[in-house]
Image: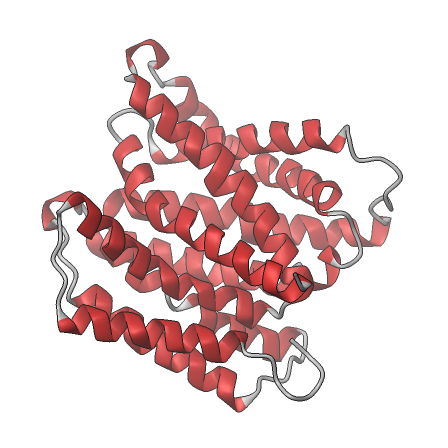
Amino acid sequence: MKPRSLAIIALFVAAIIYGVTFTIAKEVMNIHIKPFGFIFLRVGGAMLVFWILGLFVTGEKPIEKSDYKRIVLAAFFGVGLNMLAFFKGLSYTTPISASVIMVTTPILVLIFSSIIIREKIPNFRIIGVIIGLVGAILLIMYGHASEDDASNRTLGNILVFINAASYAMYLVLVKKLIVKYHPIIFVKWLYLAGFLFVFPFGISEFLEVSWQEMPTDIYVKAGFVVLFTTCVTYLFNLFALSKLKPTTVSVFIYLQPVIASIYALIVGSDQLNFTKIGASLLIFLGVFLVTRQPKIAGN
């Protein structure tokens, strides 16, 4: 299988994981673990996993001193600010509202890519981003979500938008780094720097957790966020970024509302209608256009 095809499959898997994480993380936070305490657990746990995996990676190129500054910057946007803003925002708003804001990420990636790395964006990819955005908004507008689970929707949505912009910046910043280093070598330093950012915000809430009173299913869900939402998705995204453009990677965020709707249908909390079918088709069309291989060289 071609590397490009593997990268797209990796992005689909990551999108599925992210899609279910909105609900899983919401169930864990506030009652059992406060948002910043959850981020402390997530980043700290992932850091340990990556550093343990790093022990088995030998003979790879070490990080050059000149790149540490860029890694710290990427950690601030891709781990620190990104995760702190997202989990805090999600605790204030609903998963559906949060996903509305998240679909702005590909647009922000387009802007940052053209400014920072002077990436030339083909017209069909711009059209694909817009089509996917329209489909995602339509799907979310007609989704059913409980409004009782939003304590401060405005503040929550602002924080989620900060998260979206932060993640978009991260995708652009790491593009040049990930082609130079082994993914594990890169990400272990990324998460070490990220942990230093989240430590002062999350340590107090982490120490407040009553572990002995937590139900077993909450342990499982917290473990899912650490191992799958963090470790697996970050490695998959890094692999995809090494083969594809940041714009292509970011557009897979559009799949998250589709996955959320499919999950809702499976558990019987939502119903299928023509609007949702049409919106989903628009999203998949947008993804197809953005991931389509141009006739000229490039991704």
Q: Quadrant of residue 3?
A: bottom right
The reply to whether residue 107 is in sight is no
Pick the front one: 267 or 95? 267
Pick the front one: 150 or 183? 183
Colouring convention used in this rendered image of the protein = secondary structure
Image side of residue 78 versus residue 99, left or right: right
Say which residue appears at 46% left-offset and 42% top-offset. 229
Pick the front one: 262 or 70? 262
Say which residue appears at 44% left-offset and 28% top-offset. 223
Q: Is residue 126 above or below residue 230?
A: below
Q: Is residue 130 above or below residue 61?
A: below
Image side of residue 4 versus residue 210, left or right: right
Say which residue appears at 13% left-offset and 47% top-offset. 268
Q: Is residue 65 above or below residue 218?
A: below
- x, y percent for residue 168: 52, 63
Q: How many marks?
A: 0
Q: Is residue 92 above or below residue 111?
A: above
Q: Quadrant of the N terminus?
A: bottom right
